[in-house]
Amino acid sequence: MVAGSDHFPAAIAAGLTQLGGEDIHVETNTGQVRGHYWPAPVTAGMPVVICPGFTEFCEKYAGVAARLTALGHDVLIIDWPGQGRSGHLGELSLSVHIDDFEDHLCAADALITAAGFAARPVVFLGHSMGGHLALRLAARHREFARGAVILSPMIAPPVMPVWGVRLLALAIVSAGFGRRPALGWQPTDLADERVFHERNGLTRVRKGYENQFVWFDDAPELRRSGPTAGWVRAAYESCAATTLNAAWMRHLDVQILALTAGDERIVHQPSTTRMLPCLPKCQHVSFDGARHELLFETDEVQAELWQRIESFLANLQP
């Protein structure tokens, strides 16, 4: 079972929604992986699998899950291998490492089965890296995937050119340094990182920015900061093969709702703009002036965001 809310006094004091279901665990080739299963009080819609972004963890999506369960959707949230409570795979405990994004997909497969979703039509909802993985999971499970909601999706990571980063990352990994922090990345100091700056790339809203770091006051083990060289290689290889591949995108014929930020600085926005039209059944909405963390943006952005998500889910055919 998930730890009781008494384990998160700082988060409660900040008004953050607590998880309301139970943790489930599966064994994978990366070790034990955690998910959080939260059934709706009354099931009235398709299950939703929440795919968090880079460095993220289940607790951060408690508010999203609470809203979805209130709408009648059973919810599964994933702590990706190497993130949250699914272990440390990098040389440094704060670094996010994965050898291959296939390891993420296999972990999701195991959790989907453990949650009892494998025989049910499902919807994938993902943010950033999770948006990329939501698309890959929808393609992987085309027989029961009914749609995907992708928020600020990582169609490509921010550093260009893709071919150059892939070559450099491959050389570093081949030299045996794949689990070390990527070139130019070092774990940041939490005290500095949590300070709101007007020109930050995440959100224009101070409270929305600062609340994301409150979880670490109660559970510092949830925090990650920065990728390994191996993660960089895995991410660029995955994007090159899928979301940057026009043929792959055109073949993904499930219903997609893509919600993007007009002031995007975390993922490569030109790639997003170029590739989303390749999806044959994609509704794309861009929020002018909004930044990467749409779920923590202004009240106006969140209101329209949720109106569109709820409408999209209601109109999907099981």
Image: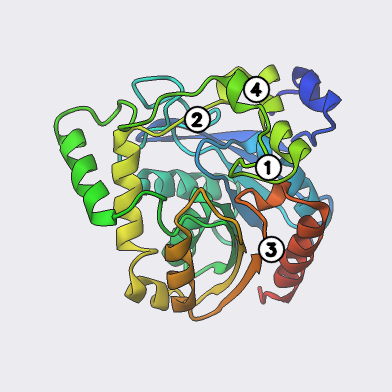
Q: Amino acid at mark 4?
A: Phe
Looking at the rendered image, the quarter that the C terminus falls into is bottom right
Q: Which mark is residue 216?
A: 4
Q: Earlier in the sequence, mark 3 or mark 4?
A: 3
Q: Secondary structure at mark 2?
A: loop
Circle 2: is it few (<14), some (14-19), or many (20+) Cα within 10 Å? many
Whether residue 121 sits left or right of residue 309 in the image: it is: left
Q: Which numbered circle lies on residue 86?
A: 2
Q: Nearer the viewer, mark 1 or mark 4?
A: 4
Q: Residue at x 52, y 50 (%)?
A: 265
Q: Position of residue 199 (x, y in %)?
A: 62, 42
Q: CA distance from mark 2 to mark 4?
A: 16 Å
Q: Position of residue 145 (x, y in %)?
A: 54, 67
- Mark 3 → mark 4, Cα distance in angstroms: 32 Å
| Nearer the camera: disc 2 or disc 3 | 2
Which label was assigned to residue 46?
A: 3
Left or right? Give the position of 231 relative to 313: left
Disc 2 versus disc 1: nearer the observer: 1
**Labels 2 and 1: the sequence-earlier one:** 1
User: What is the C-alpha distance between the residues marked 2 and 3?
Assistant: 26 Å
Give 109 or 230, whichever is nearer the viewer: 230
Question: For mark 1, what is the residue?
Answer: 61
- Label 1 neighbour load within 10 Å: few <14, some 14-19, many 20+: some
Whichever of labels 2 and 3 marks the residue nearer the N terminus, that label is 3
2 vs 4, front mark: 4
Q: Secondary structure at mark 1?
A: helix
Tag 2: amino acid = Ser
